[in-house]
Image (tube, rainbow, N blue to C red):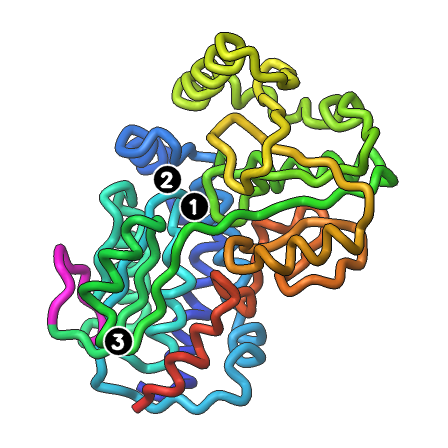
Amino acid sequence: MTLKQRIDAFSILGEKLRSPNFINTASLERTQVLNPWFTPENVTLQIQQFGDLLHSENLSRWLAGYTFDDSEKTVGLITAGNIPLVGFHDIICVLISGFKLQVKVSSNDAGLTALVLNTLLEIQPAFREKIEIADQLKDFDLVIATGSNNSSRYFDYYFGKKPHIIRKNRNALAVLTGEESPSEIRELAKDIFTYFGLGCRSVSKLYIPKGYAIEQLFDNLEDYKQLGDHYKYKNNYDYYKSIYLINGNKHYDNGFLLLKEDSSLASPLSVLHFSEYTDLSTLENELTASNEHIQCVVSGAPLNISSPVVGFGKAQQPTLEDYADNVNTLAFLERHNP
């Protein structure tokens, strides 16, 4: 296939993903049975967001400046399973750049990756020579693996001698100045709660100015109070609430989210950590020093930091150019093509 043929195939795939009938009600219900975190709303949101990205104009602009010939090399890909289709951006990168794909999907994937890849095969059958869903990676030339800090050590041991991208845990943060409007805080709620807060781009930590009124935050998060009705989310909320009460840990509670002062960037599900700051430039230095642990930072302030900064409500809306861990996947693939 030529690059144009690959772009055309993914453009048609985008049209299908944007269709409200791409995945029917019965399939959505089955997906949620297989993975209770993959609610119909979250699955539909992710499918439509990928559909919105896969316009031919977007794809051509994204690929401009790169040279990708059709390649016989195989990229081994290991995906996570924390949110629906979490590894699909990597899949797009591998296939549109002309490589063969051997993908080991997470056991939590609930069949979504296979569904989308089968749709791509219907659009462009030539991809049948390029795609393999495997139980175990073997006979690959490059590898892209995403997992936890623990699994990354395993990946390094087994795949370190191959050209690779190995990703660890990262978190999204938010920096508030105290000047945010209620509508901006409601947008921030999307960054905190979309996909239950399970994504690497989900805000897990707030930095607030000293003396910030927590009430003005909680008052504008109510749009997501229905998360407290999801039994797995509520189990986490009840568990950490009990722990904090038993241990006497100071925290704030709005009935479905626990806000706790903590230096850690990563917070448990249903918990949002926060730290106070007195000087924005000092905070910028602190965030730059922690860059390798940060996926992105949400803020309305013009921050001078190393990590990508996005506006309120934009953390879970990455573009094609927004690469996980800020490592350019296309540039990595171009270096090894053909």
Q: Decide which of tag 3 and tag 2 comes sooner along the chain.
A: 2
Asked whether residue 125 appears in the rendered view, the answer is no
Q: Write down the residue under mark 1.
A: 21
Percent position (x, y) of residue 118?
26, 59
Q: Residue at x 39, y 36 (%)?
A: 38
Depth check: 154 or 104 in front? 154
| Magenta-drawn segment | 130-138
Q: CA distance from mark 2 to mark 1?
A: 6 Å
Q: Residue at x 65, y 18 (%)?
A: 252
Q: CA distance from mark 3 to mark 2?
A: 36 Å
Q: Decide which of tag 3 and tag 1 comes sooner along the chain.
A: 1
Percent position (x, y) of residue 6?
38, 79
Q: Write down the residue under mark 2.
A: 24
Q: CA distance from mark 3 to mark 1?
A: 36 Å
Judge whether residue 136 is colored magenta.
yes
Depth check: 337 or 119 in front? 337
Q: Quadrant of residue 187?
A: top right
Percent position (x, y) of residue 9?
39, 73
Q: Write down the residue under mark 3.
A: 142
